[in-house]
Image (cartoon, rainbow, N blue to C red):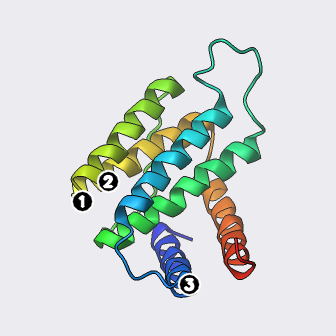
Amino acid sequence: MNIQQLFMMQKELDDFIEQTQNIQQDVFQEKGLALMVELAELANETRCFKFWSTKGPSAREVILEEYVDSIHFILSLGLLKNYTTIEKWPVIEEQRHLTATFLETQGAILAFIQQPTEDRYLAIWQCYGLLAYNLGFTFEDVVRAYIEKNEENYNRQRTGY
């Protein structure tokens, strides 16, 4: 599987949600905010910024699921702006402090929401590639978790989530 297949799966899910929820308006800002919230939820599960706490991070699968929640919205935002030419998963093998990486990623997301250029969109992907590496996730991990969460998202729509 490649990123293009993920875009196709996301388009099908987005179309299903728009039809199920009768979405008629532009939801770019809502999806942008949702991505920011998902990134914050991911940071919360890593606990990387909680210097005051001795409790460790959540289980790897919990962190991966939160990471993949973001991937859904990154793909969806790309679809909205027709920025879907990405062919390869961004592999950035650079050891970085997670807090700094989360802050950089949040800045990239906000910059894209405020000025949605393709370069800014690609910067989000680069940040998420860096996050994946520093969280110990491979593209195969992400694809597996994405497929699982994608099906869960369909089920949620079917059951009135």
Rounded to the nearest whole Å, what is the CA distance between mark 3 and mark 1? 25 Å
Q: Residues within 10 Å of mark 2 (few under 14, many from 20)?
A: some
Question: Which disc is residue 122 wearing?
Answer: 2
Q: Are marks 1 and 2 in contact (CB under 8 Å)?
A: yes
* Foreground of the two, 129 or 11: 11
Q: Which mark is residue 118?
A: 1
- Indicate the quadrant where residue 82 lies: bottom left
Taking depth in this image into account, of 48 and 143 the one nearest to the observer is: 48
Q: Residue at x 56, y 84 (%)?
A: 16
Amino acid found under the numbered disc labelled 3: Phe
Observer-side mark, 3 or 1, equals: 3
Rate crowding at label 3 as few (under 14), some (14 to 19) or many (20 or more) other CA atoms within 10 Å: some
| Residue lying at 36% horizontally and 47% vertically, measured from the top left | 109
Q: Is residue 92 above or below residue 72?
A: above
Quarter of the image for the C terminus: give it.
Answer: bottom right
Residue bearing the label numbered 3:
16
Label disc, if present, on residue 58 of the rendered structure = none
Between marks 3 and 2, how big is the CA–CA gap? 26 Å
Q: Is residue 122 left or right of residue 160?
A: left
Coordinates of residue 116 in the picture (x, y in percent): 24, 57
Q: Earlier in the sequence, mark 3 or mark 2?
A: 3
> Are the residues flagged by discs 3 and 2 in contact, CB closer than 8 Å?
no
Secondary-structure class at tag 3: helix
Element at label 1 = helix
Amino acid type at circle 1 is Glu
Residue 35 point in image, percent of width and height:
47, 52
